[in-house]
DNA sequence: CATCGGACCTGTTAGC
DNA sequence: TGCTAACAGGTCCGAT
C-alpha cells in the first residue's frame, strides 16, 4: 500500500489528533510484526505528550521528550484515530490510548510493518542509511548521475533503493520513469545526466501531486479519515498493461524486473 | 561494494 | 462453484 505519498497522507491525517495528547497506554494484541514490538516502545511513550508526528522516508516518528516511536506500514499497514468503543477488526494489532478517550489503531494483514523505539539522541540503524528526501534541494539530476556511476542494475531498482532516494516504491517508480521517458530496464549507469535531471523533477512532481490527491488507492488504502486517495485516476502506466499509452496510444508493456511487475511504454521510454 | 534471490505474512484474483 | 497458483503498494538479509 504505502509509498511516500500514502505515508505522508497518513501523517497529515493523524498528527492533529496526536499532537499535545498524553499517551495513557499501549495495547499490543499481536506483537509479531516484522520485528517483535519491544517493551521499550510503551516505556518510552507512556505518560508523556506526543509533541509531533514526523515522516522520514516511509517511516512515521511519534516524537516525545524521551525519543520517538517508529512506525512502518510495510505493504498493508494503516493507521486510524478512533473512539475507544469502535469494535475491533481482523488484524488490528495495536492501539495507542490517548488522554482524550480516543486511540490510534494500527491494522496490518500481512504484518510486514513494525513498531520500534528510538531513544532521544540516537538514530535507529534502520534510519541511519537512508538517502535524501525527494523534496530536498540536494536531490537533483547531478546527484542521481553521480550515484549511478558504475551501476549496472536496472534504473528502476536504483530509483527504488532507499539509500539513493527515499519514498519511491513500485508505483511511483513506474510513473516517474514514464514521465522522464526512461526505460525501466536501462542500466542506471547508462542514463545521461540530462535524463536524470528530468527524472529528479518527475519524482518531485509526481510525489507532490500524489500527496495533494491524498495518495493512491488501488484496493485497500484508506486515509486515516476513512477516505480513499484519488491519485489512481492519474496513473499513466502502473497497472495498465495492454491499455493504450495516454501519450502515444501504444499498448502499455509489462515486464518482471526482479520480483516486481514493471509497466512502461516501449515507444515513449528508451 | 553491487546484485540477486529468498524470506517474512495474509488476502484477493486469475485461471483451470 | 471450487481449487490452486500467482500476485500484491516493502525491505532486510545472506549468498555470490
Image (cartoon, coloured by chain):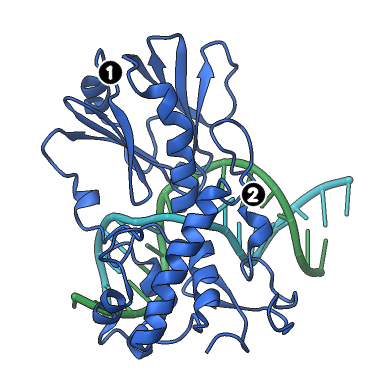
Chain colours: A blue, B green, C cyan
Q: Which residue is situated farthest in the left direction here?
A: A121
Disc on res. A49: 1
Instruction: Look at the picture and state if A95 lies above or below A122.
Output: above
Residue found 26% across the figure and 27% down from its top:
A41
| Residue density around tag 2, few if under 14, some if 14–19, many if 20 or more, within 10 Å | some
Give the image quarter of residue A244. Answer: bottom right
Q: Position of residue A120 (x, y in %)?
A: 14, 33
* Residue A149 percent location from the top left of the image: 25, 85
SS under mark 1: loop
The residue at 21%/58% (across/down) is A129
Q: Quadrant of residue A214?
A: top right
Mark 1–mark 2 CB contact (< 8 Å): no
B7 relative to A56 in the view: left or right: right
Q: Of callouts 1 and 2, which one flags the residue occurring earlier in the amino acid sequence?
A: 1
**Image check: A245 left or right of A102?**
right
Q: Which residue is mark 2?
A: A230
Give the chain letter at badge 2: A
Residue A18 vertical position relative to residue A192 in the rendered view, above or below: above
User: In the rendered image of this protein, does residue A197 appear above or below residue B9?
Assistant: below
Residue A66: where, in percent of width, then height?
16, 25
- Work out whether residue A89 or residue C4 is closer to the camera in this orientation and state it: A89
Residue A185, position as x, y percentages in the image: 48, 83
Give the Cα distance between marks 1 and 2: 33 Å
Amino acid at each position: 500500500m504505502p509509498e511516500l505519498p500514502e505515508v505522508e497522507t497518513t501523517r497529515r491525517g493523524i498528527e492533529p489528533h496526536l499532537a499535545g495528547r498524553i499517551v495513557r497506554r499501549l495495547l499490543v494484541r499481536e506483537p509479531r510484526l516484522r520485528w517483535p514490538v519491544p517493551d521499550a516502545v510503551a516505556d518510552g511513550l507512556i505518560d508523556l505528550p506526543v509533541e509531533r508526528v514526523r515522516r522520514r522516508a516511509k517511516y512515521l516518528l511519534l516524537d516525545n521528550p524521551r525519543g520517538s516511536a517508529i512506525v512502518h506500514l510495510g505493504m498493508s499497514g494503516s493507521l486510524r484515530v478512533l473512539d475507544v468503543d469502535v469494535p475491533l477488526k481482523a488484524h488490528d494489532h495495536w492501539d495507542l490510548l490517548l488522554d482524550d478517550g480516543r486511540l490510534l489503531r494500527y491494522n496490518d494483514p500481512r504484518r510486514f510493518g513494525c513498531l520500534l523505539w528510538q531513544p532521544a539522541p540516537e538514530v535507529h540503524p534502520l534510519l541511519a542509511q537512508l538517502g535524501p528526501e525527494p523534496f530536498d534541494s540536494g536531490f537533483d539530476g547531478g546527484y542521481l548521475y553521480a550515484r549511478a556511476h558504475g551501476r549496472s542494475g536496472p534504473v528502476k531498482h536504483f530509483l527504488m533503493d532507499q539509500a539513493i532516494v527515499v519514498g519511491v516504491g513500485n508505483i511511483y517508480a513506474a510513473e516517474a520513469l514514464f514521465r522522464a521517458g526512461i526505460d525501466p530496464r536501462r542500466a542506471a549507469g547508462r542514463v545521461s545526466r540530462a535524463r536524470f535531471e528530468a527524472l529528479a523533477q518527475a519524482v518531485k512532481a509526481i510525489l507532490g501531486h500524489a500527496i495533494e490527491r491524498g495518495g493512491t488507492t488501488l484496493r485497500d488504502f484508506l486515509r486515516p479519515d476513512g477516505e480513499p486517495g484519488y491519485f489512481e485516476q492519474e496513473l499513466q502506466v502502473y497497472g495498465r498493461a495492454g491499455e493504450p499509452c495516454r501519450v502515444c496510444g501504444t499498448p502499455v508493456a509489462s515486464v518482471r524486473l526482479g520480483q516486481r511487475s514493471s509497466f512502461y511504454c516501449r515507444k515513449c521510454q528508451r
